Amino acid sequence: MKPADPEVFEDTNRTNINITEKQLLGEHIYENVLYTGNVDVTNVLTGEKPKDLDRSVEDAKSFVQRTSRKDNPPRVAKSQSSEKAIESRSPYTSTVFFHFSITGSMEWHTVFKKAWESEYYKIRHVTNYETGTLKIIVSKK
């Protein structure tokens, strides 16, 4: 059966796509990918645990709101490594909900992005910052 929008599944100049519409549709669950507030940021050079990097999930959600743009896909708060947290002075970062660091591959990132931009698919996401779980739900419009 031909997909609703075949362009979503076409290779790009940087990514080979081997995902089918059947694989895309439905729920995709990514565990331990969101900021939960339960991070142990330690400066690897000094062993210090900076108190200013002990931030709540509410702080992270607020940051996501400030970095979101109306015409772009929604963003989520994702934990950073200790090294990046020390360097940026933040234990989390804001990223698009289908970022490859969350989905695990450029292939899924690309397909979710193309589906998001397509008029034939509806994508929504559900965040659970308590467990660090992100659920992406894809259906046909």
Image (cartoon, helix red, strand yellow):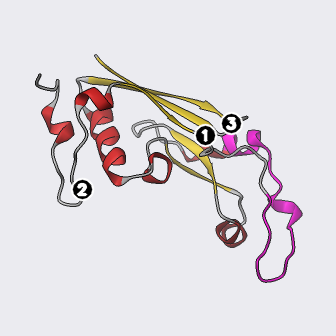
Q: Which residue is mark 1?
A: 65
Tell me, yes or no, whether the highlighted magenta stretch contains residue 61.
yes
Residue at image location 84% in from the left, 61% down from the top: 52
**Which image quadrant: the N terminus?**
top left
* Three-letter code, disc 3: Tyr
**Which residues are the magenta region?**
40-62
Left or right placement of residue 16 versus residue 54 in this view: left
Q: Which residue is mark 2?
A: 15
- Of labels 2 and 3, earlier in sequence is 2
Tell me, yes or no, whether the highlighted magenta stretch contains residue 16.
no
Measure the C-alpha gap from mark 3 to mark 1.
15 Å
Left or right placement of residue 111 versus residue 90 in this view: left
On the image, the x and y values in percent for residue 98 come to: 44, 42
* Three-letter code, disc 2: Thr
Left or right placement of residue 123 versus residue 47 in this view: left
- For the residue pair 3 and 68, the one nearer the viewer reads as 3
- Of labels 1 and 2, earlier in sequence is 2
On the image, the x and y values in percent for residue 102 come to: 50, 48
